[in-house]
Amino acid sequence: MSDATDVLAPLLGPPALPVVGWPDSDEDGVLHWKTRGPVEWAHGRPFVWVDDEISPADRVWVSAHHHGPALLHRVDPRHGLTERDFTVIRDWLEQA
């Protein structure tokens, strides 16, 4: 939840960022249990969601239910965030 803001931000220096709350349940059919949260929080605004469990079903659902730009970027859990991931996100943000 807010670990990045509470723990990492003081060490690394970025500002505190908003945190999207997740539902209590981890069951939502074929969708990842987090999928609805970013869409509801964004309310049509552009957003980036970075996760290691994003699936094609999540992408389809977001494109059908979110009426603004969204980048769902899947990170390889074996490597974590890499320079390539940051490049993809930066390029998307510059065009959004």
Image: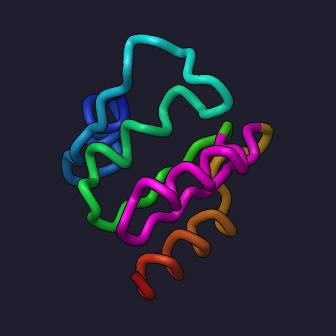
Residue at the location (53% across, 26% down)?
33
Q: Residue 84, position in %: x, y?
A: 69, 68
Magenta stretch: includes residue 74 = yes
Quarter of the image containing the C terminus? bottom left
Q: Residue furthest top?
A: 25
In the rendered image of this protein, does residue 48 appear above or below residue 56?
Answer: below
Give the side of residue 16 with respect to residue 34, left or right.
Answer: left
32 vs 76, nearest the viewer: 32
Q: Residue 55, position in %: x, y?
A: 70, 44
Q: Residue furthest bottom?
A: 95
Magenta-drawn segment: 54-77
Residue at the location (26% across, 30% down)?
6
Quarter of the image containing the N terminus? top left
Residue at the location (27% across, 38% down)?
19
Q: Quadrant of residue 77?
A: top right
Residue at the location (30% across, 37% down)?
20
In the rendered image of this protein, does residue 56 appear above or below residue 32?
Answer: below
Give the side of residue 4 with respect to residue 84, left or right.
Answer: left
92 vs 85, nearest the viewer: 92
10 vs 79, nearest the viewer: 79
Give the side of residue 26 with respect to residue 10, left or right.
Answer: right
Q: Residue 62, position in %: x, y?
A: 50, 53
